[in-house]
Amino acid sequence: MKNKGLLIVFSGPSGAGKDTILKKLLEKDPNIRLSVSATTRLPRKGEVHGTDYFFVDKNEFVRMTQQDEMIESAEYCGNFYGTPRKPIDNWLANGDDVILEIEVQGGSQIKNKCPDSISIFILPPSFTELEQRLKNRKTESEEAVQKRLAAARNEILEAVHYDYAVINDTVDHAVDEIIHIICAEKHKVKRDNLLIERILNHA
Amino acid sequence: MKNKGLLIVFSGPSGAGKDTILKKLLEKDPNIRLSVSATTRLPRKGEVHGTDYFFVDKNEFVRMTQQDEMIESAEYCGNFYGTPRKPIDNWLANGDDVILEIEVQGGSQIKNKCPDSISIFILPPSFTELEQRLKNRKTESEEAVQKRLAAARNEILEAVHYDYAVINDTVDHAVDEIIHIICAEKHKVKRDNLLIERILNHA
């Protein structure tokens, strides 16, 4: 019998390299699924329902929230965003691990609704390094970069509420450390109620 | 600045392969120290004070226990055995990880005295496999093996009080999993109070 999968809350400041890490992690571990958010905003060109987002109207979103079908939700620029519980529960029941990439502020909501979840915070090696990375993108004005850095500083302070912190010194190293964390969590005795019985009675 | 090392309580039934795993683990990770017990029994030929045991007399043992210098102790066949706290604290302060191989019954005493410690329980792949291993040793009578198996069954039931369980299917696999557990524990945010400060202020 398969054990239940692991729900992993995944956060970090802009510029810490979350997306690159996630891409490599999903390549390395085919057992990991990426959670898809629901939103009331209209699909952009090329966005696919169920892959990029679940696109729902406001009434449906409100109904889902009221009936506790979302494990977290937030409003942003007049649109609602949230994480539907059902697809996650299905994956977990199937033994798949599910990653929930989420804003730092939303992370704490999950722990209350899903006490079995774990949370991982991705950190840059240093704030100076983060500054350098954001500046090297050269897609934003100095002012925008400074704004982003101020936000990042506040986000990093929230790491204290997470279970694990992984420093993204190199992507490969960070990915390996996340894989070790997932492996360790699966060896927690409390996650496997039937372990002892299985060992004692297995022929 | 070095982080404090990790205290690892390590238990499992006879025949689960603890000693083989420990030997390989110490070879693979030079940062791990093995705790040395204190005992009131006399040294056997070839045993070295400070390596095999700390040999102390009964008065000294009682004094150490009364002054809370032992993190666990027990009496066995008229002799006292215990784990002195000081060498462990020194290693941990130096950033070394310390493994405490201990009888299943003693494991729970440690968690009370050292809440930062973690505990790992080594399991055989199945009880049938354990039976086979013990019988293959061919050093004991059938009766002695049956006694050992009955004890092992009770010990395995205690795994529920441990943080992690590792199944010794192959020694290399089990050692790798223990290394992953240690790695993951070191990424716990609560183990590194200065992490966020270091990231934010590191030039």
Image: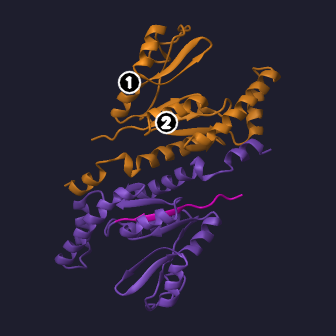
Chain colours: A orange, B purple
Question: Given the image, what chain letter belongs to the residue carrying mark 1?
Answer: A
**Stretch in magenta:** B1-12
Which secondary structure, mark 2? Answer: helix
Where does label 1 land, which residue? A86
* Residue type highlighted by circle 2: Lys
Q: Which mark is residue B108?
A: none
Residue B203 visible in the displayed image: yes
Question: How far apart, in angstroms, are the residues tagged by discs 1 and 2?
Answer: 17 Å
Q: Residue B15 appears in which quarter of the rendering?
A: bottom left
Tell me where residue A64 appears, x and y as whole percent. 42, 17
- Marking on residue A111: 2
Q: Secondary structure at mark 1?
A: helix
Evaluate if marks 1 and 2 touch, with contact meaning CB atoms under 8 Å apart. Answer: no
- Residue A40's place in the image compared with A179, above or below, is above
User: In the rendered structure, does residue A158 fall within the stretch colored magenta?
Assistant: no
Point 23% across, 76% down: residue: B138
* Residue A74 versus residue B129 in the image, above or below: above
- Furthest residue to the front? B66
Determine if residue A24 is in view. no
Numbered label tally:
2
Kindly report which numbered mark, 1 or 2, lies closer to the viewer in this rendering.
2
Q: Residue furthest right?
A: A142
Say above or below: B33 vs B139.
above
Mark 1 neighbour density, 10 Å: few (under 14) some (14–19) many (20 or more): few
Q: Residue A36 in the image: state x and y as whole percent.
A: 47, 22
Left or right of B49, for residue B22: left
Tell me which residue sits at (25%, 51%) in the image. Answer: A198
